[in-house]
Amino acid sequence: MCGIIGYTGGSQVLPKLFCGLESLEYRGYDSAGIAFYDTKAGMLCLKEKGRVSEIRTLAAGYERDMGRKIDAHCGIGHTRWATHGKPSDLNSHPHCTSDVSLVHNGIIENYAALREELSRRGYRFLSETDTEAAANLIDYYYKQTEDPISAIRAAIREIRGSYAFGILFHDRPSMIYAVRKDSPLILASGEDGNYIASDIPAILKYTDQYYRLEEGEIATVSPALITVYRDGGASFTPEYEKITWSVDAAEKEGFPHFMLKEIHEEPRAVRDTLSSVLSSDIEAFFAENEFDTINIVACGTAMHAGLIGKFMTEKLARIPVNVYIASEFRYQDPILGSRDLVILISQSGETADTIAALRLAKERGAHTLAVVNVIGSTVAREADRMILTLAGPEISVASTKAYSSQITVMYVISIKLAELRGRLSPGEANALLEELGSKVPAAIEEVIGQKEKIRLLAGEFLQCPSVFFIGRGLDCLLASEGSLKLKEITYIHSEAYAAGEMKHGTISLITDGTPVIALATDKKLFEKTLSNIKEVKTRGAKVILVCPDADHADPSVCDFRIGLPALNESYAPFTAIAALQLLAYYTAVLRGCDVDRPRNLAKSVTVE
Ligand code: AGP
């Protein structure tokens, strides 16, 4: 997500913008910028790809060239996490027109249509971003109405998607305007002026009085007064809440750890990623290219997402898919050529093993498709094509919302390929995609709503030397990801096993009290999985059964149960993995582990 800060008041604005942006750096970003009203030079904008410190350098250079200090008391600032348009100076925010400067956090879904219409109205676009369409649209209506609020209202009626906007109108030098939908924005009242910000850390140094702007409310922020306008014209001065968070807690928006915050972001990550993939040209790409083999290459959790992609693509589209661990890919001496596709999945886009696999695939002449969460990353840049997961910055080392976003892409690819091959009708494909965009996020929310019940189960493993995850079909793939999550943040050894395979050796490890987490989300496999559960149960295992709520599990078979909301079984990975992530999280907290920065691990493994 991007970071927004704005200030207007009696103090110099630049120090506040820089300090506010630097307090948002933890969110991850690739470029930064500020726009402000200099009392002598008027409206100025300094922005570029890179760090906030480089904007400080730009400002110092401007003052040196002008032979004077900048004197400005009103401005806005932004740190960008690229979604539409690579990291570059031109794509950085603020986006400025002749009358308006604007910063944005969110995604404008209909930006292409808006750009087309605004081009017809004579606007020129300098960047590749969705945001510039909003700046030009507000500019267009401001020229029509000469009233900021009317212009904002008219513009947001045409914008589809999510936004938090901070806006300057150049002929109103001490005023900031703000409006939001689906992206957070707060207003804050300080002793020396007033602020807008995308979240609390940006203003915590200056004030503890804040107001969370509600959906559709428009705020006018002057040095002395903040006024909020609701549809229908009612306006009021906000009642401020007192911030009780520390800076550290504020960065996590009140959650104790980034991992828990990021699990809570999974429903949005799925919705945003789905919107991103469906607005990409992925369908045309697969329609225009018939591949002999599809190969998925990744590491860790990303590779586990690839396993879901394999399972669903083979199930729906009946196309064989190979999945490779990236670090092993080169040793397979893969048979690849121009009729083969290699999909590289990577949250960071900087994983050395995945980059090496990408380069080998290209050497062999294969098409390469990157599924990444960081738009300017090496994997994104070097692959022939890219699909961006819109999970937003994932800070915790343990990957959670990135996984949900990655499997969202995998599902879309499997559904689109099945439709292209006539194995799904357009109606069936659309129904599945509709379910993915609506029922799946809601079902994940329901699982998250059960977190207290799941937290109580965490105590069951604390002293265990080892935990087993078992399942069949999709559940067997989920077991691998659930096991990895538990291992990497709790340091408890665990193993994922095909439920039907336990009796061929590994069941010898089951003794009294051995925890076994059994995944049984597929009704057709329920009875068989149940018999495997009974096998371990009779040998003393303590069984936690993860299955749809409605499925009656014989209480004599499992010691505990995590009930999942009703959902198309094919989408069970979304809800089951959220439960397993929470189970791992609460176990790690109970064990006093460093949840967000587990020992020996890095967020991006940039060594082979
Ligand atoms: C997952 O929780 C781990 N942090 C790790 O397995 C990670 O998925 C793997 O290193 C791949 O990282 P990437 O997605 O950034 O390439």
Image (cartoon, rainbow, N blue to C red):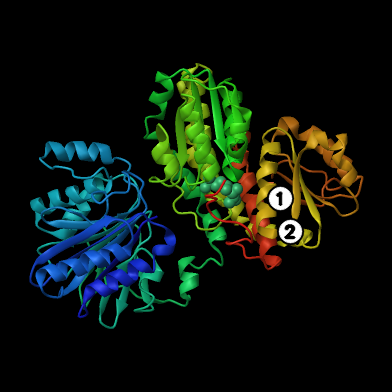
Left or right of 96 on screen, residue 93: right
Type of residue at label 2? Leu
Q: Mark 1 = which residue?
A: 562
Residue 91 horizontal side relative to residue 65, left or right:
right
Measured as percent of width and height from the top left, residue 504 is found at 87, 34
Residue 211 position, x and y percent, is 36, 70
Q: Does the residue labelled 1 lie within 8 Å of ligand 1?
A: no
Q: Could you tell me which residue is drawn at 67 percent across and 49 percent down?
A: 484
Q: Helix, strand or loop at disc 2?
A: helix
In the image, farthest residue toward the bottom: 191
Which residue was labeled with disc 2? 457
Specify whether tag 2 is near ligand 1 (CB below 8 Å).
no
Given residues 331 and 14, the one toward you in this image is 331
Q: In this view, does 20 lie above or below 375?
A: below
- Answer with the quarter of the image where residue 191 lies: bottom left
- Does 371 appear above or below 230? above
The x and y percentages for residue 501 are 81, 34
Q: Residue at x 69, y 59 (%)?
A: 490
